Image: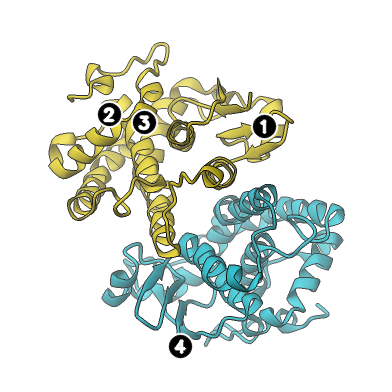
Chain colours: A cyan, B yellow
Amino acid sequence: MPQLIHTMLDPFSRRIRLLIGELGIDADVIEEKPWERREELLHLNPTGLLPIFVEDDHTIIPGIESVADYLEETRGLPVGRNLLGKTALERAETRRLVAWFDVKFHREVSRLILTEKVERRFAAPGRGGGATNMNAVRAGLHNIRAHLDYIGALAEHRNWLSGDDLTQADLAAAAHLSCLDYLGDVPWGANTAAKDWYQRIKSRPSFRPLLADHIRGMPPPRTYADLDF
Amino acid sequence: MPQLIHTMLDPFSRRIRLLIGELGIDADVIEEKPWERREELLHLNPTGLLPIFVEDDHTIIPGIESVADYLEETRGLPVGRNLLGKTALERAETRRLVAWFDVKFHREVSRLILTEKVERRFAAPGRGGGATNMNAVRAGLHNIRAHLDYIGALAEHRNWLSGDDLTQADLAAAAHLSCLDYLGDVPWGANTAAKDWYQRIKSRPSFRPLLADHIRGMPPPRTYADLDF
């Protein structure tokens, strides 16, 4: 069986966990702790980043940018499933929004909070571990509000974030937000349309494995797995 | 005629300028100065980033992640040109390397140097303008050497960076390096294989418009446009 190597509170790993659920891909989902910087992980992906998809014949597909399209092409296209969009224009909008979350939201919100609250705690000193910089956390918590408004504005005018159909744009946005939701850091009361959209995607079967995540010593708030949050 | 809105020393704009050359796309290439933060630019792309491709019917394709695939799909695929790779595995390798340069090389090298040497100089105070942080420049100049070695190692084992054929991986790498080369900041003597690869791609007709770039008050070194550098 193919393997998906991931880590729990990583938005990029989570997008692919959602994608394999949506595309109905059977894979062994294997947890890695990237801050341990295992030598073997660097052989699989020289950036040391997750997710990594490994085929039965040991073909390695490393990193979110490769895996996301590779799975669509090899598992989605042959059976007509598609989470990028049906036309070139729809796919362009999906890719624009995926970059919005993976680049802009990541830089302004999720990387700030996840680095300070997760990596600082679990990584060894000298490898990213240490005291939490609360100014960085506060900046992330401030910036998330404008992003929730953007998600709400999209969700009010469209069925899903990039148009009529669920796409990787929704998976990317939900992947980032779900990491922060695990930490109790999403002010859902701030935008009703964004919350409604998240409630819809959170209810999908593909989301269940994410809601079952539990990190030792860092349990999620009760509302994390609650579909009526 | 479609428009490509770009800015001269931007690696992402440069990749698409190379791509339209390779795919033989006729487009009006229009220069924008993103640090002026024109209101109109934010209407075209809410991130304020370039490049932006505008079709004759005013359809807007904003941002590198959208434009790169959109042009392949609408201009490349119909006529059998292809700069992503022929198989899903080749495309995965292309996307891995594009991300290597657009994310990792950008963070470790080109963003550091270009922010400090270009944006600081041309942007207004309070909008990114100000004194150059020489420590950031020095960090970029230090980090570029390991990346040249990586390019050299790939080029020694493959015809082009991602395999037998020229792909967007080569365009991405060359786009970043060409910005730094305009500033005289690429130590070509440090890796012969990397220099040989760059010489090959620099000699392609698609590269000519980039070699003609000239920024007022910031001329390139003589070797920038020289194919025998």
Which dot, 3 or 2, sits closer to the camera? 2
Mark pair 3, 4: CA separation: 44 Å
What amino acid is labelled 3 in the image? Cys
Q: What element does badge 1 sit on? A: loop
Q: What element does badge 3 sit on? A: helix
Q: Position of residue B88 (x, y in %)?
A: 45, 63
Q: Say the numbered circle drawn on residue B55.
A: 1
Q: Position of residue A163 (x, y in %)?
A: 77, 55
Mark pair 1, 2: CA separation: 29 Å
Q: Which residue is mark 3?
A: B179
Mark pair 3, 2: CA separation: 16 Å
Q: Are marks 1 and 3 in contact (CB under 8 Å)?
A: no
Q: Are marks 2 and 4 in contact (CB under 8 Å)?
A: no
Could you tell whether B134 is left or right of A51 in the image? left
Mark pair 4, 1: CA separation: 44 Å
Q: What element does badge 4 sit on? A: loop
Label 2 marks a residue whose chain is: B
> Residue A190: which quarter of the image?
bottom right
Relative to B67, is A176 above or below? below
Quick check: can you spot residue A45? yes
> Residue A54: which quarter of the image?
bottom left
Residue closest to the eye, A133 or A16? A16
What amino acid is labelled 4 in the image? Met
Q: Quadrant of the N terminus of chain B?
A: top right
Label 1 marks a residue whose chain is: B
